[in-house]
Image: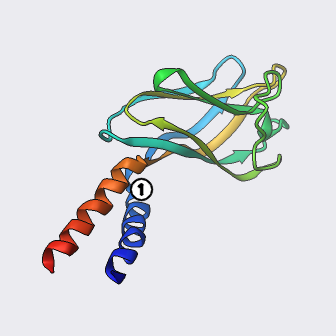
Amino acid sequence: MKKLAVLPLVCGLAVASHASAMDYVFDFGSVLITPANPQSQNATLSPGAGWQVVGFTFDGYYNYTHSFFATDARLDIFGPGGFHYAVGGYDNYSGNPWQFGDGEGQKTHTQAIGPVDANGDWTVQIVNDWAPSAGHNWSDLTVTLHMVPAPGSLALLGLAGAAAIRRRR
């Protein structure tokens, strides 16, 4: 019986350690984002049935060369089934603030979203959302979608483990 009590914990740890391997990274590299030149990337994800996107991490170095604020950038994430999530912005503020301040330096924002079916077409777009701005200069800029299996998949894994333990007896 004690083995069965430990099984959900072991399954949870296995999924947690595996989840980062299933993350998808949109790598923008070094970019100058102007109001007229937003940066976007598209990807069709197919991690398998039951996988869900549950969050994202925005990470990059903001080069404070144009005297504009890092928080004026707006991130839009579009996913399957009409999913849309936005963070930041100025002229078209999303209502969701960044977790970082202005000024030069490393900027990281991690946010839970969804869950949304991971399978399908995804677009990540970064917009300089302050019209008078000359541009935002970013380097090493990435947006990572965090994926995990659906709870039903985890439950099936737990049941399979329980059956295997019981069968050994």
Q: Residue at x 78, y 44 (%)?
A: 64
| Residue 6, position as x, y percentages in the image | 39, 77
Does residue 115 sit above or below 13 in this rendering? above
Front in this rendered view, residue 85 or 71: 85
Quadrant of the image containing the C terminus: bottom left
Residue linked to disc 1: 19
Front in this rendered view, residue 145 or 156: 156
Does residue 10 sit above or below 58 in this rendering? below
| Residue 168, position as x, y percentages in the image | 14, 78
Q: Residue at x 30, y 54 (%)?
A: 156
Q: Is residue 144 visible?
A: no
Q: Secondary structure at mark 1?
A: helix
Does residue 111 sit above or below 75 in this rendering? below
Query: What count of labels does the image hold?
Result: 1
Left or right position of 80 against 39: left
Q: Is residue 162 visible?
A: yes
Q: Residue at x 25, y 67 (%)?
A: 161
Left or right position of 101 against 57: right
| Residue 154, position as x, y percentages in the image | 36, 55
Q: Residue at x 42, y 71 (%)?
A: 9
Left or right position of 44 against 102: left
Left or right position of 56 against 158: right
Residue kind at label 1, given as amino acid type: Ala
Question: What coloring was used for the rendering?
Answer: rainbow
- Residue 44: quarter of image: top left
Quadrant of the image containing the N terminus: bottom left
Mark 1, other Cα within 10 Å: few <14 / some 14–19 / many ≥20: some
Which residue ends up furthest to the top in the rendered image?
36
- Residue 141: quarter of image: top right
